[in-house]
Amino acid sequence: MQPGERGSESFGALLRFFRERAGLTQEGLGNHVKYSKSQVAMVERGERAPKGGLVDIADDVLGAQGALSLLAKKEFKDNGLRPWTEDYLAEERKAASILSYQNHVIPGLLQTEAYARAVYSCIACPAIDDEELEKRVSTRLDRRQIFQRKPLPTLGFIVEQSVLTRPLGGKHVLKEQLLHMLDAGSLRHVQLQVMPHNRQTHASLMGPMILLENAERSQVAYIEGHNGGYFVSEQPDLGNLVGKYGILRAQALSPEESAKLIEELAQDL
């Protein structure tokens, strides 16, 4: 199962069976697993994969004697992702527009396989083993299918210039990455901009952000840090982030200027 896709109707039905047998409501089970009533309902309908500790906690609370855990292992792919990352990917997959500002690494949707592997190899405290690293790389590469999805989404990226000179994985990896970015930026539905390091003003010194908009034009922002990620959907916070991104676009180099700079940086490697 790909992260962010539908859950399992089989698992949902079994969860509902054990919940009703135990005499618990969806709200009651939610209190045990830290889910809302609607989230439990989505899992039971097969619309959401169980995340966090739901499977193990529900198995114990409902007296399922390992049945839920056994089915979950068969139904849900272990992709090595953290729960908040899966929540984000669920939103990304249905987004009609994705606008990303990154100041540490190349945005995930633009990463090559070698660059993604270099990024995950840098993870420390705790480090991840080779198997988990490869799972994360595979999942990241699968996300690139969005570039060919129909209808085509609107994709916008603003990247700090310093990111384009940080040789994660080595100079050859960085050069391949920069050339790949040029190819992606040439697509009609993709806008790629670079924030030059000589700017004296900057609208997002607080860090990276991703703005997502679905087909119904409902917006949400996503912020990720060391210990997790979270969505921003309420005003005025959401509006403030949208406003900041608009200023970032104006402060960054134009797509044409950005492409020229990226090409020059690649040639120097």
Image: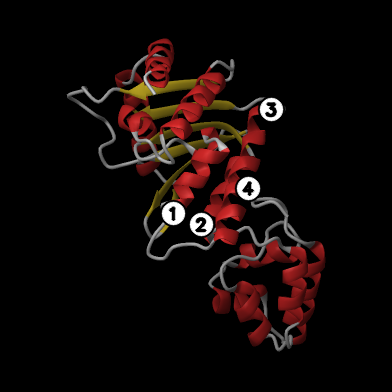
Res 79 → quadrant: bottom right
Question: Could you tell which of marks 3 and 4 lies nearer the N-terminus?
Answer: 4
Say what amino acid the circle numbered 2 marks: Trp
- Report whether 109 appears left or right of 104: right
Residue 84, disc = 2
- Label 3 or label 2, whichever lies nearer to me, is 3
Sequence-first tag of 1 and 3: 3
Marks 3 and 2, Cα distance to the nearest angstrom? 25 Å
Q: Could you tell me which secondary element the residue under label 3 belongs to?
A: helix
Disc 1 from disc 3: Cα separation:
27 Å
Q: Nearer the viewer, mark 3 or mark 4?
A: 4
According to the picture, the residue beneath numbered tag 3 turns out to be 148
**Residue 118: % across, % down:** 47, 45
Return the residue nearer the eye: 76 or 141: 141
Mark 1 Cα-neighbour bin, 10 Å: few <14, some 14–19, many ≥20:
some
Q: Rate crowding at label 2 as few (under 14), some (14 to 19) or many (20 or more) other CA atoms within 10 Å.
A: some
Look at the numbered discs 1 and 2 and tell me whether their residues touch, using CB distance below 8 Å: yes
Q: Position of residue 234 (x, y in %)?
A: 42, 46
At label 4, the amino acid type is Ser
Q: Nearer the viewer, residue 9 or 254?
A: 254
What residue is shown at x 52% (from left), y 36% (from top)?
111
Whether the residues at callouts 1 and 4 have beta carbons within 8 Å, the answer is no
Residue 138's tag is: 4
How far is disc 1 from disc 4 in space, using C-alphas?
21 Å
Q: Mark 1 or 2 closer to N-term?
A: 2
Label 1 vs label 4, nearer the camera: 4
Quadrant the C terminus occupies: top left
- Which residue was labeled with disc 1? 229
